[in-house]
Amino acid sequence: MKKLLHTLALLVCFGSFGQDNREVNFGNTLIRLPKVIGLTECYREPIVKMNADLFKGTDDEEILGFYISDDEYNDLYNSLMEKGLQKEFVKIYSTNLVKNYNVSEEDFNKFSSGIRSMFNEYEGSQIQSKINSKMELFDISAGKPILLDEYQINSKIKSYVALMKFKFENENIISLIVMNVSIIKNKLIFIAYYDKYSNSDQIKKLKAKNDYFLLSLLAAN
């Protein structure tokens, strides 16, 4: 009986993982967007698309998927219309400039270097004191995000952890972001995992969530 229950549990878990996967076409390549625990992919929802499009970096950017927390999705129109995005969210995207281009390892390394140049280098060991001392000067409209860490969990993914400052309704908001550049099915795909910054312990937690998300995306493709 115990073995049967264990088998049924596995079937439920793996079955639910695959049922809600959505496919999007990018350069005649199908990219599968996985079901991820705690998050809901909902870019097709008009109000989500409206909010997500605010995070487009350029006119050439194409958003393939946009995940918000289950809590916000379950109260979608009240939460987004009244408060905007308050919790973690993930954007999967690329650019039309490489839509029909198969990316080589050399190309991937060049793009990764380009991404790294977007950040200011982080100096010092005390993250919290760094933020406090730079808070008034840290203006995302004029400067660059502060790079805290960079790492790889896979030869085809490079990840950059950074702090960004946003201004929303006269309020300064410090956001923690993990920017990932990857090759999926020979296409250059970016994944950005955002959350509000609260303390230095959150960095390790967001990296773990980001890595889980990336592994889910790789497993689906």
Image: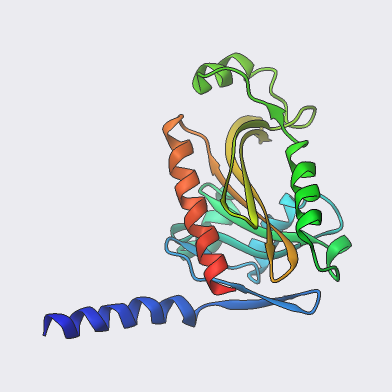
Residue 89, compared with residue 7, is above or below; it is above
Q: Position of residue 26 (x, y in %)?
A: 76, 73
**How many numbered markers are drawn?**
0
Q: Nearer the viewer, residue 79 or 139?
A: 139
Residue 167: name its quadrant. Answer: top right
- Side of 56 where 60 appears, left or right: right
Residue located at (79% from left, 63% from top): 103
Residue located at (43% from left, 43% from top): 205
The answer, for residue 41, to whether it is visible in the render is: no
Residue 32, compared with residue 199, is above or below; it is below
Q: Position of residue 6 (x, y in %)?
A: 21, 78
Residue 90, compared with residue 30, is above or below; it is above
Q: Nearer the viewer, residue 180 or 74?
A: 180
Q: Position of residue 71 (x, y in %)?
A: 43, 58
The answer, for residue 149, to whether it is visible in the render is: yes
Q: Nearer the viewer, residue 148 or 140?
A: 148
Residue located at (57% from left, 21% from top): 131
Q: Position of residue 183 (x, y in %)?
A: 69, 62
Q: How is the image coloured?
A: rainbow
Residue 70: name its quadrant. Answer: bottom left
**Which quadrant, please, contains the N terminus?**
bottom left
